[in-house]
Amino acid sequence: MEYLLLKWVHIISSTILFGTGIGSAFYMFMATRNKDLSVMYFTVRHVVIADWLFTTPSVIIQLLTGLALVHLGGYNLTDGWIYWGLGLYFFAGICWLPVVRMQIRMRDLIKDSLETGDDLPKHYWRMNKWWTVLGSLAFPAVVMVFYLMVFKPSGF
């Protein structure tokens, strides 16, 4: 029963993590393409809030429940699918951490531009490019983690 409960929490938190991530990325991407500063500010401000309310707790819950499931399931951290799953999880996290900081800075730059009436600085657009690159790297890593956790391939 303990294993199934942990597995359920793990699946729910992975759903929240993935859903918030892809939803935030979509809305931020679309708002940026719109180039209406008030729409951009509204969107980025809420993406930052979503990261604190949903993504951050899910990231923590994923690691804790995942490690508990490995232990209760009698698996080893050196099993290929777990080793690669953890590696990809941490890779996605390494991509996500600067994205969080960028989103906060981008939100502040948009707010400044709204208040002053100035155009967004070039620095904003450089961060937006890196935000897109890092998200494009993290997304397939997370998809591969899902694959590894579901199929548990022995050849890994």
Image (cartoon, rainbow, N blue to C red):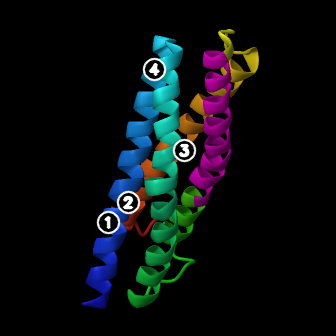
**Mark positioned earlier in the residue sequence (4 or 1):** 1
Q: Is residue 88 above or below residue 72?
A: above
Marks 4, 3: nearer the viewer: 4
Mark 1 sits on what residue? 11
Q: Secondary structure at mark 1?
A: helix
- The Cα atoms of the two marked residues, 1 and 3, are separated by 19 Å
User: What span is in magenta?
Assistant: 90-115
Which quarter of the rendered picture does the N terminus lie within?
A: bottom left
Q: Do the residues bearing badges 4 and 3 touch, measured as CB atoms within 8 Å?
A: no
Residue at x-position 32% and y-position 65%? 11
Given the image, on which type of amino acid does mark 2 rest?
Ser
Marks 4, 1: nearer the viewer: 4
Q: Is residue 108 magenta?
A: yes
Q: Do the residues bearing badges 2 and 1 touch, measured as CB atoms within 8 Å?
A: yes
Mark 4 sits on what residue? 39
- The Cα atoms of the two marked residues, 4 and 1, are separated by 33 Å
Q: Is residue 47 above or below residue 5?
A: above
Q: Is residue 3 above or below residue 33?
A: below
- The Cα atoms of the two marked residues, 3 and 2, are separated by 14 Å
Q: Secondary structure at mark 2?
A: helix
Query: At which x and y percent is residue 125?
Result: 67, 19
The main secondary structure of the magenta stretch is: helix
Mark 2 sits on what residue? 14
Given the image, on which type of amino acid does mark 3 rest?
Ala
Mark 3 sits on what residue? 138
- The Cα atoms of the two marked residues, 2 and 1, are separated by 5 Å
* Total numbered badges shown on the rendered structure: 4
Q: Is residue 144 above or below residue 32?
A: below
**Mark positioned earlier in the residue sequence (1 or 3):** 1
